[in-house]
Image: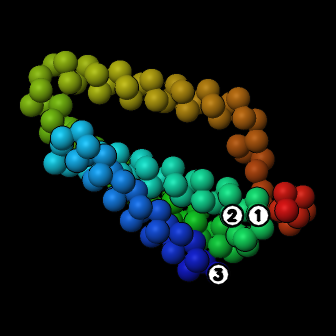
């Protein structure tokens, strides 16, 4: 069921939030340090592990993909708003770093997409799922 994908996302988000806050306390910062990144890594790992063990039906995979597709842009947009304010108050160095990292990210993603070769030909098939099980 698609709702199971939502449950997996919720569990990963709560764990990532907790681990991010714990990491912040260990570093002496009163903030969540990397909680979103930790939760997304946990979501990817959970999806892959459950899929390899055969516990993640195709419909549930659609739920995970749907929410991960919604979750990432929303969180990135919220973070970007905070980062823009910090960069503009930080002066020219912040703006240079932001533009450089944006350009670098675009080139890295384009390179990875070309390297994988299956980005545009990917399709859901029952045979591929049965082979991995």
Name the disc covering residue 50, or none: 2
Q: What element does badge 2 sit on?
A: helix
Q: Which residue is mark 3?
A: 1
**Residue depicted at 18% across the width and 31% down the height:** 87
Answer yes or no: do the residues labelled 1 and 2 have beta carbons within 8 Å? yes
Q: Nearer the viewer, mark 3 or mark 1?
A: 1
Question: Vertical placement of 102 versus 27: above or below?
Answer: above
**Residue depicted at 51% across the width and 73% down the height:** 6
In three-dimensional space, the C-alpha distance between marks 3 and 1, rounded to whole angstroms, equals 17 Å
Let me know if residue 39 appears in the view: yes
Question: Vertical placement of 125 versus 106: above or below?
Answer: below
Q: Residues within 10 Å of mark 1 (few under 14, many from 20)?
A: few
Q: Residue furthest front?
A: 26
Q: Residues within 10 Å of mark 2 (few under 14, many from 20)?
A: few
Q: Residues within 10 Å of mark 3 (few under 14, many from 20)?
A: few
In three-dimensional space, the C-alpha distance between marks 2 and 3, rounded to whole angstroms, equals 14 Å
Q: Is residue 44 left or right of residue 103?
A: right
Image coords of residue 43 (percent x, y): 54, 58
Name the disc covering residue 31, or none: none
Mark found first going from the N terminus, 3 or 1: 3
Q: What element does badge 3 sit on?
A: loop
Q: Is residue 117 left or right of residue 93?
A: right
Image coords of residue 126 (percent x, y): 86, 66
Image coords of residue 108 (percent x, y): 54, 27
Image coords of residue 24 (percent x, y): 25, 46
**Residue depicted at 9% across the width and 31% down the height:** 89
Split into 4 quadrants, where in the image is the C terminus? bottom right
Split into 4 quadrants, where in the image is the N terminus? bottom right
In three-dimensional space, the C-alpha distance between marks 1 and 2, rounded to whole angstroms, equals 5 Å
Q: Which residue is mark 1?
A: 53
Q: Nearer the viewer, mark 2 or mark 3?
A: 2
**Residue depicted at 65% across the width and 35% down the height:** 113
């Amino acid at each position: 069921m698609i709702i199971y994908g939502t449950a997996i996302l919720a569990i990963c988000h709560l764990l990532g939030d907790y681990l991010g806050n714990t990491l912040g306390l260990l570093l002496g910062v009163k903030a969540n340090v990397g909680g979103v990144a930790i939760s997304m890594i946990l979501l990817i790992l959970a999806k892959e592990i459950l899929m390899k063990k055969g516990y993640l039906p195709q419909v549930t995979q659609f739920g995970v993909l749907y929410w991960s597709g919604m979750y990432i842009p929303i969180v990135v947009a919220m973070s970007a708003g905070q980062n823009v304010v910090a960069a503009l108050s930080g002066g020219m160095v912040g703006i240079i770093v932001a533009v450089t990292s944006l350009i670098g990210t675009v080139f890295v993603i384009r390179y990875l997409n070309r390297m994988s070769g299956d980005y545009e030909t990917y399709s859901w098939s029952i045979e591929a799922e049965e082979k991995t099980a």
